[in-house]
Amino acid sequence: MTVVNDRSDPGVTEGRYPAPDAAHLLACTRAIESLMKDRGVIDDDTIDVVAAKYENDIGPFLGAKVVARAWSDPDFFDRLLSDATAACKELGIGGMQGEHLIALADTDDVHHVIVCTLCSCYPWPVLGIPPTWYKSPEYRSRIVSEPRELLRDEFGYDVRADVEIRVVDTSAEMRYFVVPQRPAGTDNLSEDELANLVTRDSIIGVGPVAAT
Amino acid sequence: MRNVHDVGGMVGFGPLPRDDDNGSAFDSEWEKATMGLTFAAMANGYVRSIDENRHAKERMRPEAYLESSYWELWLAALEVNLVENGAFSEEEIVGRTQEFLDDPDRPIGTNSLPELNDGLVAMIDNGASFGGDPGVPPRFAAGDAVRVVRTRTRRHTRRPLYAQGCRAVVSRVNPPFALPEVIAHEAEPVFEHTYQIRLDASEVFGPSGDASSAVYLDVFESYLEPEGDPS
């Protein structure tokens, strides 16, 4: 057991963060990029290539596809619950921060909501990059102690008192996402139409799915 | 380490910040750059693990952590990792930053390394798991009564304060992964079995907790002791 770094002090962040303004942050990223280019360890397009994946290719529409398929196909629903990683892979969905996915199916008696209290872990392959509020201390703190109140106050989502709320804290390597209940009155909808109803917030667990 | 990032259960933070919720992944060029630079740094071994990167954020002074925006925390952690892993000196980073502040049109340089981009896209598409074999069978099984062991470690831990000392029941046996306390700090990882545990809100928050809610937490094996264990 070779210790590489046992530091617990702020290191170079001391006195430099938060930065005075966005110009400093931009200058800092330019500086690091140019230092890496001088050393030949980054490509001219690396930043744009990585960003494009999360701006274009990956987002909540993927999670909506998974949920819509689960609602439409009971066998897929079962496979999703028993091995969400493999089931999502059937739809070509998976990858970084989703190597070990678990689908949490809401029922009449149980409602799930996900959080990462310690940082911002999130099932990227099915939802993309999390919204600011999900990553905020405001959410990460209160969802644990006041879940029912937070859902009502912030999202207008009233979860009945007899429904158990399970707050799932993403504290290790598993990545969780919610399979919300299919709303009534949607029996005649196609899978694509169902997917259009499924919102990012319903897959996080902070809102229900509306029938229209 | 027990610092202000460990906010689970606190109630003083106020309303959620919802103003910028427009579905965009990034709100500025520097945010976009911060993600790409961090990924490139990891690919080059300048950041040794995600846990090491997380710990760098957790080491910030409480006021610095709370006043920095989300991507600012990423950039701060990247700087810490780059300097302490010997990629660039603090003087180089601060000096070059000042050059760009003094002259925003300073050329950023050019380099061709398409294989890095291909590798990062493959990592995003296929993932990169931190699993490994602990060499022993799991100590606990679903249904076991356990208690979360307290700690005052200054190392990186994924053991929130709200759960420490609490009784819980194992709800799932999850795969083994690299223990954060080791991978963030040492050259060789140590793998432990992990578990999802269920903590009743009444256990975490006492009689004032929501009687019909529960918190589920993923923990490493060394975070648990059997309930009833006279330790």
Image: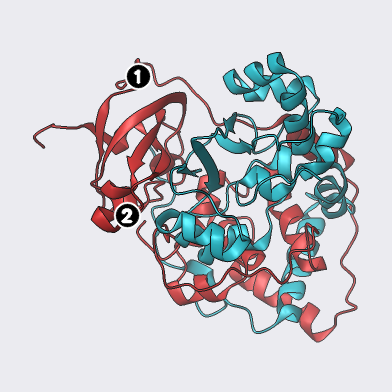
Chain colours: A cyan, B red
Using the image, determine if residue A85 lies above or below residue B217.
above
Q: In which quadrant of the rendered image does the N terminus of chain A lie? A: top left
Along the viewing direction, whichever of B134 and A65 lies nearer the viewer: A65
Q: Chain of mark 1?
A: B
Q: Residue at x 29, y 37 (%)?
A: B168
Q: Secondary structure at mark 1?
A: loop
Is residue B79 visible to us here? no
Q: Going by the picture, which residue comes out furthest to the left? A: B230
> Where on the picture, by quarter, is residue B215?
top left
Side (left or right) of B224 relative to A138: left
Q: Residue at x 57, y 56 (%)?
A: B81
Q: Going by the picture, which residue comes out furthest to the front? A: A185
* Residue at the spot of label 2: B209
Q: Residue at x 57, y 60 (%)?
A: B77
Side (left or right) of A136 relative to A186: left
Q: Position of residue B76 (x, y in %)?
A: 59, 66
Q: Position of residue A118 (x, y in %)?
A: 47, 54
Q: Which mark is residue A191?
A: none
Along the viewing direction, whichever of B25 and A103 lies nearer the viewer: A103
Q: Residue at x 31, y 23 (%)?
A: B143
Is residue B194 visible to us here? yes
Marks 2 and 1 sit apart, C-alpha to C-alpha, by 31 Å
Mark 2: give few (<14), some (14-19) or many (20+) Cα within 10 Å. Answer: some
Side (left or right) of A129 relative to A170: right
Total labels drawn:
2
Q: Position of residue A40 (x, y in %)?
A: 81, 51
Which badge, 2 or 1, is on the more N-terminal residue?
1
Q: Chain of mark 2?
A: B
Discs 2/1, front: 2
Mark 1: give few (<14), some (14-19) or many (20+) Cα within 10 Å. Answer: some
Which amino acid is tagged 2? Gly
Q: Which mark is residue B138?
A: 1
